[in-house]
Amino acid sequence: MADSLQTVMDYAVAVARKAGEVVQTALAGDRKVMTKSSAVDLVTQTDQKVEKLIIQSVKEKFPTHRFIGEESVAAGEACELTNEPTWIIDPIDGTTNFVHSFPFVAVSIGFSVNKQVEVGVVYSCLEDKMFTARRGRGAFCNGEPLQVSEQTDVHQSIIATEFGSNRDPEVVDKIFCSMKNVLKLPVHGVRSAGTAAINMCLVASGCVEAYYEIGMHVWDIAAGSLIVSEAGGLVLDVDGGQVDLMSRRVLAANNRSIAEKIVKEIVLFRPPRDDAL
Ligand code: IPD
């Protein structure tokens, strides 16, 4: 598979760029907004169109490969990660941003074999930044190597996290409690880009020391998780244990020292797993 992984990588980059052009064109026009799991879990026709475009393009080149796509799962397809070569796709990560023209929107494409992400591509469309990684070969942004921050003092750090789209009062309380704990460490700042994929690329780029969230999905983090680890960072569960991409819990950090400090502040809970939806 070694060299064919480069073919996958090149194709993923080309498809992400094509998808990004569709997203940019759509930003100039009207967006019809629909909802999914809650009144604030948004989807547009562009999400669906871009996912179809990506899947059709990939099927032409790799007819035997499998797919996990955000909108296909929303339409009832199984979300099952097997050992087979699988493309894990979020056509628009940051749909709420897209709806409001808040300028952080990404196409996220991960490729896994034996349940391990081998290729990660995140295209931040409006910034025109193409983040790429191949297992064991480093992470890059527009061809330039990425390296996580060297900061080991959490008090000198910026931490990214998200509110997500669950408005159950108990869940909202837990999310705010974690944020309050992190803020009071104290840290220099807490930030939300509105897209998990871009938050992870910010960790890989060394702009923020860590990103954590409970509630995002496998398609939001598959590509970004490889980009972080190939930039020298760690990707863990929010309890500090081994990450499980289907568990909807993630902590990406520049190093173990920062990760351990953040783990202590997170109020833990378990949303339904992606493979149980
Ligand atoms: C969402 C974004 C957001 C995160 C949510 C995700 P979507 O993905 O990544 O930052 O907080 O948990 O679901 O719906 O824009 O693809």
Image: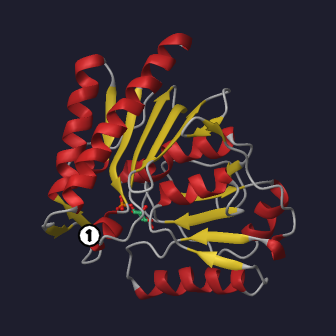
Figure quadrant of the C terminus? bottom left
Q: Residue sitting at 66 percent across and 27 percent down?
A: 137
Rendered view: 163 above or below 142: below
Mark 1 CB within 8 Å of ligand 1: no
Count of marks, rendered view: 1
Name the element at disc 1.
helix
Q: Nearer the viewer, residue 19 or 39?
A: 19
Q: How is the image coloured?
A: secondary structure
Rendered view: 208 above or below 188: above
The reply, left or right, for residue 157 in relation to residue 125 is right
The residue under label 1 is 99
Image quarter where ligand 1 lies? bottom left
Q: Residue sitting at 32 percent across and 28 percent down?
A: 66
- Image coords of residue 44 (percent x, y): 19, 61
Residue 84 seen from this side: no
Rendered view: 259 above or below 116: below
Q: Nearer the viewer, residue 100 or 21?
A: 21
- Image coords of residue 106 (percent x, y): 40, 53
Displayed quadrant of residue 8: top left
Q: Residue sitting at 51 percent across and 72 percent down?
A: 162
Rendered view: 188 above or below 74: below
Q: What amino acid type is highlighted by mark number 1?
A: Val
Q: Nearer the viewer, residue 205 or 161?
A: 205
The reply, left or right, for residue 71 in relation to residue 259 is left
- Image coords of residue 147 (percent x, y): 73, 46
The reply, left or right, for residue 122 in relation to residue 27 is right
The reply, left or right, for residue 77 in relation to residue 117 is left
Q: Nearer the viewer, residue 167 or 3?
A: 3
Q: Residues within 10 Å of mark 1 (few under 14, many from 20)?
A: some
- Image coords of residue 101 (percent x, y): 31, 70
Residue 209 seen from this side: yes
